[in-house]
Image (spheres, rainbow, N blue to C red):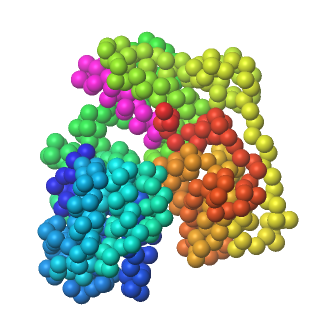
Amino acid sequence: MAETALYRRYRSQSFDELVGQDHITKTLQSAIRSGRIAHAYLFVGPRGTGKTSAARILAKCLCCEKGPTPDPCLECSFCKRIADGSLGDVMEMDAASEAGVEEVRQNIVQRAQYAPMEARYRIFIIDEVHDLSQRGFDALLKTIEEPPANVVFILATTEQHKVPITIRSRCQRYEFRRGSLEEIESRLKYVCEKEGIEYEDDALRTIARLSDGGYRDALTLLEQAHLAVGGKLTRDEVLTQLGLVGENSMDDLLRRIAEGQVGPILEAATALVQQGKEPKAIVESLALRLNELTHALYLGKHAGATKEEVALAKEIGPHRILAFQEALAHSMRDIRDVTLPRVWLELTLVKLSAAGEPTAEAAPGVEEPLAAQSPAKRDERPAAPRKEPPPAEPPKASPSAEDANPKEPGQLWEQVKERLTNRFSASKQLLGASFGVAIEDKALIVGFKNRFLFERLQGKLPKVEGIIAEMVSEVVGEPGWAVRFQLQQENGGKAATQEVDSSVVEGDDLVREVQSVFQVEKDA
Ligand SMILES: [Zn+2]
């Protein structure tokens, strides 16, 4: 998605304006205040979360006439020229288009040898740094290893695992996170009010959901919808303008699918196609709606769900919602190869309704295992019984919850987990693979062994962090606690291996749990 006028106009100019990244701005500002300026920074995070904006702000902090300062004046010639990209001492480079060793030598290595021309520092901002070639990295490494005085590197990447460890280890690393639904919504509201765009709250919530936590994508979608609609933004119009289908039609279709009556399903599909909806858009809208219902089911009003949505989600039920999503994810994988879209649409919908059927394998009165709901899965592993996870061991060091020390990370996390499990029963297996690592300031650091799980928890649902942080505060009996998740490798992680909880859920069971609790699309 290209940058848009709206996005450029509302690009953050100072740390105060940088939304949703307080953990980063506070640390950076206090470092600048105390004169601790690193030679190299690595900004890591999903697209559109403000990495490049933060890099420019940091450049202003360092170069401002009144600086180095955590609050650049934005008025002096340096601040202004950094904002419009015309200050020669601050160089921006996109590694995606200038990846070769020659570019790195000419643009960076050679220039870095000279003192800054006008400003206090010479600053190199390298976007998408993971795209540099191996030899490009080698050339860069030498300069980063022995940086000339007054040279600062700010590297930004969406894929830090592709950045060689030799480079990473020489950088101060900052992790940008996706915005929560609320944060994105409130940013959208702010922009709408500034721009005089009329809106219904529902419309902005839908845009926030579609943007998947990226501020840039959210503003791009807003602009697209605004230009197309002209007047007041409503949810249905947003969906229509983006080619998607409104929720009433989707809910109706979903009910028919849940009832499993093929005739009514085909009638509804035909009606939508006759209204001019693309089969692909219908399937995508269905995926979006199922995602919303999952949130409604597990987070309720915390996810901004309405009473009607919660009721519909309960009516369809968690097992069928999950089965529909699995079947849908399967269909969407073939989306590019479809030659007869309408036939594909009908087939997909009919398959969905079959996926929701209870199967003969489920004993009456017994909660049916999730695996039994997907016909595809059943065929692949006909006789394999679902592996039950080992029972969770009681926390080793705490004889009882009462006299446990809540300030000890392992015990604190055990107590929080207990509360979480009481509230969201499905989170039990999910959290089995986690353990308290450390307490830093007022933050509990929680380690995860499983990368898949960790990334889902980090990226997909910042809301979860909020809920868990609240519980940590409750257990400690002191407001304002935070929780941070870390990936801990089995070997060489920060925590000793024996600290790892033994009730680790592995493989398919874990994947299913994650999908059922926090996640929608299948990790294809
Ligand atoms: Zn200034």
Image spot of residue 140 (x, y percent): 35, 61
Write down the quadrant of residue 43 in the picture. Answer: bottom left
Residue ID at (72%, 57%): 497
Let me know if residue 35 appears in the view: yes
Query: Compared with residue 412, is residue 325 higher up or lower down, i.e. above or below?
Result: above
Image spot of residue 318 (x, y percent): 58, 35
Which residues are the magenta region?
Answer: 269-292
Query: Compared with residue 433, is residue 280 higher up or lower down, i.e. above or below?
Result: above
Q: Residue furthest right?
A: 399
Quarter of the image with the N terminus is top left
Q: Main secondary structure of the magenta part?
A: helix
Residue ID at (44%, 75%): 27
Image spot of residue 392 (x, y percent): 78, 49
Write down the quadrant of residue 376 in the picture. Answer: top right
Q: Any magenta on residue 146?
A: no
Query: Compared with residue 442, is residue 203 higher up or lower down, i.e. above or below?
Result: above
**Residue placed most toward the observer, 363 or 482:** 482
Write down the quadrant of residue 146 in the picture. Answer: bottom left
Residue ID at (23%, 75%): 114
Q: Any magenta on residue 270?
A: yes
From the viewer's perspective, is 332 left or right of 426? left
**Residue placed most toward the observer, 234 or 444:** 444
Image spot of residue 77 (x, y percent): 14, 79
Let me know if residue 308 appears in the view: no
From the viewer's perspective, is 486 left or right of 338? right
Residue ID at (13%, 68%): 86
From the viewer's perspective, is 315 left or right of 207? right
